[in-house]
Amino acid sequence: MSVDPSLQAQLVLRSGFGALVGEMFGMGWLGWGLGTAHAFTPTVITLFDVFGILLFCYSIYFIRKGRSLRRSYPASSDPLTEKMRKRFIVVVVSEFTAIAILARVAYARHRPDLVPVLAAIVVGLHFLPLGKIFRQPRYYLWGIAIALWCGICAILFRSDRLVAWSSIGTGVLLWANCAHGLLRARVIVRSLAR
């Protein structure tokens, strides 16, 4: 059974874009957690920057590689792409709406420390429909991992420790998802080069 190279090229491009978004949000979550924990030592700053820059650069590389492959393997017009885009927008709007509502509830209950945890749980859960939309089974794994991590943090920690650990874990898991997508794109690029 052969795989359509135009679909593979599209997957490389999407993996690059997904990784870029994951890298940026992961850096934000991780930086927030490390800042809250007052953990920005020179070593941590160096590692944070190096990993962030590497993920960013590899994301850009695979975006460019995906575009190049799409020129080499043009896709026929696909009405499915427009349908995917609409579903993606619905998921993202729903995600931000849920985060806003949960933040309001947390503040009303005088628990602002729950805001990042609840937001991260929603972020994790939003990967579930995205996995189906983009046909990326790895999103199920990473989405559930983020939601579980934050649930465990909500049970174990309070106040600043809750914010720090849930944010650090969310950032690390987002970066792991990003790296996973980039490794997948690398395998596809190598298979198309044969």
Image (tube, grey):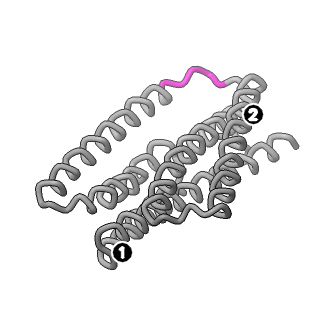
Give residue 124's position: percent from left, percent from top. 40, 56
Residue under the point 43% across and 52% down: 127
Q: Nearer the viewer, mark 2 or mark 1?
A: 1
Closest to the observer: 1 or 156? 156
Residue 77 belongs to magenta span:
yes
Q: Which residues are magenta?
A: 75-79
Quadrant in which the C terminus appears: top right
Closest to the observer: 95 or 78? 95
Residue 73 belongs to magenta span:
no
For disc 1, the neighbor class at 10 Å (few under 14, some 14 to 19, many from 20) is few
Give residue 172's position: percent from left, percent from top. 54, 61
Q: Main secondary structure of the magenta part?
A: loop
Instruction: Report which residue position mark 2 lands on.
Output: 65
Q: In the figure, residue 71 lies in which quadrant?
A: top right
Are the residues tagged 2 and 1 within 8 Å (C-beta)?
no
CA distance separating discs 2 and 1:
39 Å
* Amino acid type, mark 2: Lys
Mark 2 or mark 1: whose residue is earlier in sequence = 2
Instruction: Report which residue position mark 1 lands on.
Output: 152
